[in-house]
Image (cartoon, helix red, strand yellow):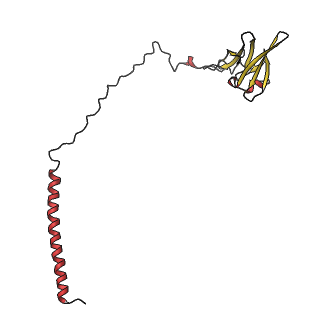
């Protein structure tokens, strides 16, 4: 056990330490408060100026030379779109049996030569599957209802007529010239 004198000595040491610590803390806090108050008193932060915004230029719509987007003349009837009877001449035959070369797009077909027998020319077509097929005038090939219109063996070219929808929805025909690969 501790003697009375030891207990008193320890208590006195604790009180003395507490007083010393209190004195140190008090002076540091005053210095800290003074530093905070005066540290940036004369300095102002530099702020970048805002970017200059160009003035807004309004567009004034003048319909003198423009097409009115809300005009009823812009509406395409079902006949003009190829859904009615008005455009039946160019519309592809829906009930026609598809030919084997119509299963491939034109870029998947490679023309490798021509064969002419009894003044009837045939084109030798190789598919991307490696199969070689013969086609003649009137046969279909490609996925746009392309029909062979002309085979010119001397110039090594084939003329197809494809039937496609134009941007307005009308059926049109277009000529496609394909040269024979060597």
Is any atom of residue 93 visible in this view?
A: no
Q: Position of residue 77 (x, y in %)?
A: 63, 19
Q: Residue furthest right?
A: 118
Q: Position of residue 8 (x, y in %)?
A: 17, 85
Residue 34, by quadrant, is bottom left
Residue 152, by quadrant, is top right
Depth check: give the residue in front, 39 or 114: 114
Q: Is residue 49 above or below residue 111?
A: below
Q: Position of residue 165 (x, y in %)?
A: 65, 20
The residue that appears at 16% across and 54% down in the rendered structure is 35
Depth check: give the residue in front, 72 or 113: 113
Residue 169, by quadrant, is top right
The residue that appears at 72% across and 28% down in the rendered structure is 128
Q: Position of residue 100 (x, y in %)?
A: 78, 25
Question: In the figure, is residue 46 to the left or right of 149?
Answer: left
Quarter of the picture containing the N terminus is bottom left
The residue that appears at 46% across and 12% down in the rendered structure is 65
Depth check: give the residue in front, 65 or 48: 48
Is any atom of residue 141 visible in this view?
A: yes
The residue that appears at 15% across and 65% down in the rendered structure is 26
């Amino acid at each position: 056990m501790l003697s009375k004198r030891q207990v008193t000595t320890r208590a006195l040491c604790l009180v003395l330490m507490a007083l010393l610590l209190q004195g140190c803390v008090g002076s540091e806090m005053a210095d800290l408060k003074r530093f905070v108050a005066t540290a940036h008193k004369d300095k102002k932060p530099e702020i970048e100026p805002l970017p200059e915004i160009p003035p807004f230029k309004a567009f004034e719509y003048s319909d003198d030379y423009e097409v009115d987007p809300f005009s009823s003349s812009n509406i395409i009837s079902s006949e003009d779109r190829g859904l009615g009877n008005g455009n039946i001449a160019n519309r592809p035959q829906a009930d026609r049996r598809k030919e084997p070369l119509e299963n491939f797009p034109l870029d998947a077909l490679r023309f490798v030569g021509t064969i002419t027998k009894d003044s009837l020319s045939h084109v030798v077509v190789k598919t991307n599957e490696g199969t070689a097929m013969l086609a003649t005038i009137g046969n279909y090939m490609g996925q746009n209802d392309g029909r062979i219109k002309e085979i010119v063996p001397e110039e090594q070219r084939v003329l197809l007529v494809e039937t496609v929808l134009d941007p307005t929805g009308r059926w049109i025909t277009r000529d496609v010239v394909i040269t024979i690969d060597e």
